[in-house]
Amino acid sequence: MKKIILCGYMASGKTTIARLLAQASGITYLDLDEVIEQQTGKTIPQLFLEGGEIQFRKKEHIALKEIVNKNESFILSLGGGTPCYANNHEFLQRDDVLSIYLKTSIKEVVSRIETQSNERPMLNNLRGEELEEFVAKHLFDRSYYYMQAKHRVATDDKSLEAIVNEIMSLL
């Protein structure tokens, strides 16, 4: 049984890489945000609006715990903030979990966010230096939690195929 968890900052490629890994390995793909949306019948932005971040993080923790405790194989992409709350980083260290931090530089994250601005409404008003400063602060705050993953895979200047192959070699 393989329990694989991908973590990293927004735009690090968690969802894309997890889907490709699932195709390459035949292991079921799950996206934690999608699981929460299915369980609640609400979008993540709706959950934040209606209950605030604390309520969302509680739901997120419960959903993560349920997934990891199942006796099933999966490839799970986490939300960018998931490891940073409710001791969720401890799931990355479990003996039955292979956890991977998709490590992406500030410059690369900013570049990806700027090309995906429609998909990230929270950041629509940030550009250039402001966006870079925002990302740098977040990455600094979150790096301790991301580094709890058992493996790190750098994503800068690599093709999706190269990243997937590197992770497949860990399985």
Image (spheres, rainbow, N blue to C red):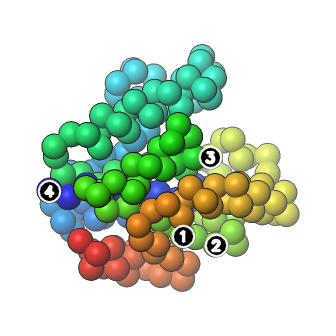
From this viewpoint, is residue 158 visible? yes
Say which mark, if any, is on residue 135: none
Instruction: Look at the numbered disc 1 and give the secondary structure of its residue.
Output: strand
Name the spot of residue 53 as percent of width and height, x first. Answer: 62, 28
Residue on which the image places disc 2: 105
Residue at the image point whose x is 39% and y is 20% from the top: 41
Give the labeled residue for mark 4. 1
Look at the numbered discs 2 and 1 and tell me whether their residues touch, using CB distance below 8 Å.
yes
User: What's the distance in space between the residues labelled 3 and 2, CA to CA?
Assistant: 18 Å
Q: Nearer the viewer, residue 47 or 87?
A: 87
**Location of residue 131 by image quarter:** bottom right
The residue that label 1 is drawn on is 103
Where is residue 43 shown, x and y percent of the image? 48, 28
State the separation of the CA atoms marked 4 and 2: 32 Å
Q: Residue at x 53, y 31 (%)?
A: 57
In the orientation shown, which residue stands out farthest toward the top?
50
Q: Secondary structure at mark 3?
A: loop
Residue type pointed to by label 3:
Arg
The residue under label 3 is 120
In this view, the mark in front (3 or 2): 2
Q: Tell me which amino acid carries mark 2.
A: Ser
Choose the circle earlier in sequence order: 1 or 4: 4
Is residue 59 found left or right of 131 in the rendered image?
A: left
